[in-house]
Image (cartoon, rainbow, N blue to C red):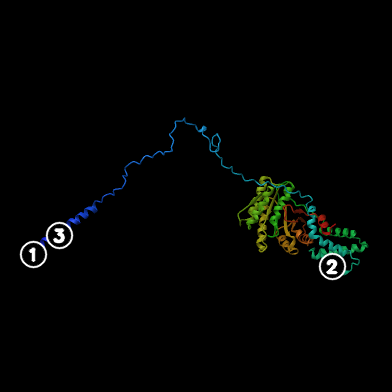
Amino acid sequence: MEIVILAVVIAVVVIGALGGLVVGSRRKKRQLPQPPPTAPDITAPPAEPHVGEEAETPRDEPRRTVEEVDLPDGGTGPVAVEEPPAVEELEVPAIEVPEPTAGRLVRLRARLSRSQNALGKGLLTLLSREHLDEDTWEEIEDTLLTADVGVQPTQELVERLRERVKVLGTRTPQELRGLLREELLTLIGPDLDRTVRTEPEGRKPGIVMVVGVNGTGKTTTTGKLARVLVADGNSVVLGAADTFRAAAADQLQTWGERVGAHTVRGPEGGDPASVAFDAVKEGKEIGADVVLIDTAGRLHTKTGLMDELGKVKRVVEKHAPLDEVLLVLDATTGQNGLVQARVFAEVVDITGIVLTKLDGTAKGGIVVAVQRELGVPVKLVGLGEGADDLAPFEPEAFVDALIGD
């Protein structure tokens, strides 16, 4: 029994010893891994390239200079370096030479005739009737009133026509035309001084203030007036005193640049009187002939407008008195324009009227009505959208356009 137990113990010891040897050999293999047999030696220098079988043996030839080497384009000279494109200078717009003002209204007569001819033809047709009874004279009155001549001027004209037709007796078309022409001229006032006063005696510059409701073409008219003055040989400074509309200052400056007139402007919403003062000051310093001042026209606050224009007038007159105050009216508004005229007449002393868009209305009688209302003459008329479509008002040319040839 003891022998069997001893044999078992010896067998266990032997098996344990053999297991330890196996484990130890496995650990040694993990601690010392052998490199793969095909790994290259990274320290070895790279192999030299081999010359192909078709490669030629290098030949000994003399070296060539750069000048002797053919250029890619086949030339023999040095490579041209392409210069960068020249920067084009911005062209300064050429200053325009406005059309002379003499005879402008005559040139624009056809345009005026197209809109006003109905008045003259209507009157001539009525006067040519065989029997001029009360109904006919009432029709003549209605024709004049429709043309915005006004009640009082219409009554005066009809009364004179009735008297002269009665005395004349026979009424040939030529006689009637001459008669109507004389009476219309008398009504418009051929002897009124329609000169735009820009040349005061003993000093420079002449100072002109332009007033009117926004939307009547006031700023555009100021720019066109600058062209009229430049065409007559004057140097002009523009004062953009309508500071409540940035577009007005921009527009006025554009008009000025086209004829070489300098524009004085201030910040948007700034003091209009300050801009007007600076414009007159600059005009005096550079020796300009005329200063044109464009003002704001916001009729929705009559009190504010009166205060503002009154202040502009007072400030400007610290330099010199105003030579001209021009009121711009839209002829297409007819009798409504007279309401505007009254408001401005209360603010400043109007010395002349500019009627714009006269070619766009058949109510040319507004010329008579507004002169009667304000007691001042129409001096300029606008007859289109063109830059030179502002013309000095000539009563004879205007009446001839009314009644036609």
In front: label 1 or label 2:
1
Residue type at tag 1: Val
**Quarter of the image with the N terminus in it:** bottom left
Q: Label 1 vs label 2: CA separation?
A: 162 Å
Percent x, y of residue 57: 43, 34
Q: Label 3 vs label 1: CA separation?
A: 17 Å
**Quarter of the image with the C terminus in it:** bottom right
Q: In this view, does 353 lie to the left or right of 32?
A: right
| Circles 3 and 1: CB atoms closer than 8 Å | no
The part of the image, by quadrant, that contains residue 143 is bottom right
User: How many numbered circles are shown?
Assistant: 3
Residue 15 has which mark?
A: 3
Element marked by disc 3: helix
Q: Mark 2 points at which residue?
A: 139
Q: Label 3 vs label 2: CA separation?
A: 149 Å
In front: label 3 or label 2:
3
Residue type at tag 2: Glu
Percent x, y of residue 305: 66, 60
Q: Mark 1 points at which residue?
A: 4
* Furthest residue toward top: 62
Observer-nearest residue: 405 or 164? 405
* Furthest residue toward right: 169
- Number of other residues with Cα within 10 Å of mark 2, as a class: few under 14, some 14 to 19, many 20 or more: some
Percent x, y of residue 353: 75, 57
Observer-nearest residue: 340 or 78? 78
Element marked by disc 2: helix
- Number of other residues with Cα within 10 Å of mark 1, as a class: few under 14, some 14 to 19, many 20 or more: few
